Amino acid sequence: MSGTYKKNNEAELIVMKGRDTKPHIGIFGRRNNGKSSLINSLTGQDVAIVSEVPGTTTDPVKKSIEIPGIGPVVMIDTAGMDDLGELGTKRVGRTREIIKRIDLAVLVLAANLFGEPEELLINELEKWEVPWIVVHNKSDLVGADHSLKKQFDGRLVDYSSISPSNKEMLTSLIIRHMPETAYLTKSLVGDIIRQGDLVLLITPIDEEAPEGRLILPQVQAIRDILDNNAVAVVAKEREIDSLMKKLHPRPALAICDSQVFLKADGSIPTDIPLTSFSTVLARYKGDFENYLKGTPRLSELQNGDRVLILESCTHHVSCDDIGRVKIPRWLSQFSGKELDYTVVSGLDNIPGEITDYSMVIQCGGCMITRKQLINRLKPAVEAGVPVTNYGMAIAYMQGIYRRAIAPFVKSDETASDYL
């Protein structure tokens, strides 16, 4: 592999829990405004430590709860945004990082105190397009005054974590402001298949495949196909040639792992639409339009360019890892250039400035929310740095990009617009 290969998080890594795909609600406010008490009140459990000592909450605390009308969500308790000192500044910094990862923010006030910390937070929320509501807490001591209610009309609820008589009102406010895209999932392929269609899923079982199970995108595809009253046929790549002679009816769609795209392209007749699990996820959860624009820019990379590879989960790294080994190898071979690769896993901070990079390659993002993925790419998109995803980049480098995106664009002519 040509070029320098840099890793962020060299140690063995742990898979992120499934709760990270649920809608996330961040709880923000000054120290001792009752953020932790609010979470305990909503969950009905002593999830967060409650104390009269300011600054008790130091790191974000997560708790999954069920909200009727939305379903399971993750509540995140954060440190006070008015924390002091060197350590306090770091805590506030971590609190602000949470903004990029949430679908809704709850700003907790008390004693009608609203000032610069709250204004700065709201500005940051609006910068990242995060909807927000206001909870005036400790209303059993001091209720929200008229001016505050007028200022946040439609967004504010007077609340007491000690005597939560209007919990339903708060829940209704959360439901009203939570974006439906955060919890109402659309179909992966429901718009391109019909009832009774046969869909062929090509799933290699190699050293990267988890022991005894399929990877999440494959499982999601099977469930989505069944939900659309179609038939899923699952096979390894070495079985495809013989299987195609037996299948009747012929598949209406074939979806393969990106790593066997070339094999699938040669085995699946050209009149059968073929794409990859990663490309399906790119349209389902990623910034698909910007991926379409950015992927062809792989051809423009020059010697010394820096390529940022974003893994949105953390995992055990194999010697033939798709993001850390194969894509850098294939891209160096495809471009013929000496490239510099930086890999960032999970939702860790990106080293340096985003403009230091000439290309961003994002994984499918199956383990994070759509909001987290979109905000992960937002700085690059705004700075004009091209973005793509694993499957689309692999298809482009292997010369089958048009076929990979064709099922999801309006026509072959439209596909040509992105070549």
Image (spheres, rainbow, N blue to C red):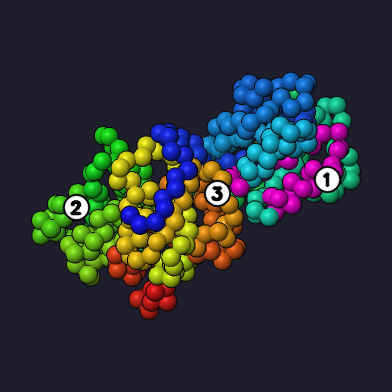
Mark toward the start of the polypeptide (1 vs 3): 1
Left or right: residue 87 compared with residue 315: right
Residue where numbered disc 1 is placed: 116
Vertical arrangement, residue 266 with respect to residue 183, above or below = below
Which residue is located at x 17 percent, y 62 percent? 267
Location of residue 195 in the rendering, given as x and y in whole percent from the top left corner: 30, 57
**On the rendered image, what quadrant is the C terminus found in?**
bottom left
Which span is picked out in magenta?
100-126
Q: Left or right: where does residue 195 sit relative to residue 170?
A: left
- Please identify the quarter of the rendering in which residue 403 is found: bottom left
The 10 Å Cα crowd at callout 1, few under 14, some 14 to 19, many 20 or more, is few
Which residue does the image show at 44% across and 42% down from the upper left?
A: 313
Element type where label 1 sits in the image: helix
Residue assigned mark 3: 350
3D distance between C-alphas at marks 1 and 3: 28 Å
Q: Is residue 124 magenta?
A: yes
Say which of marks 1 and 3 sits in front: 3
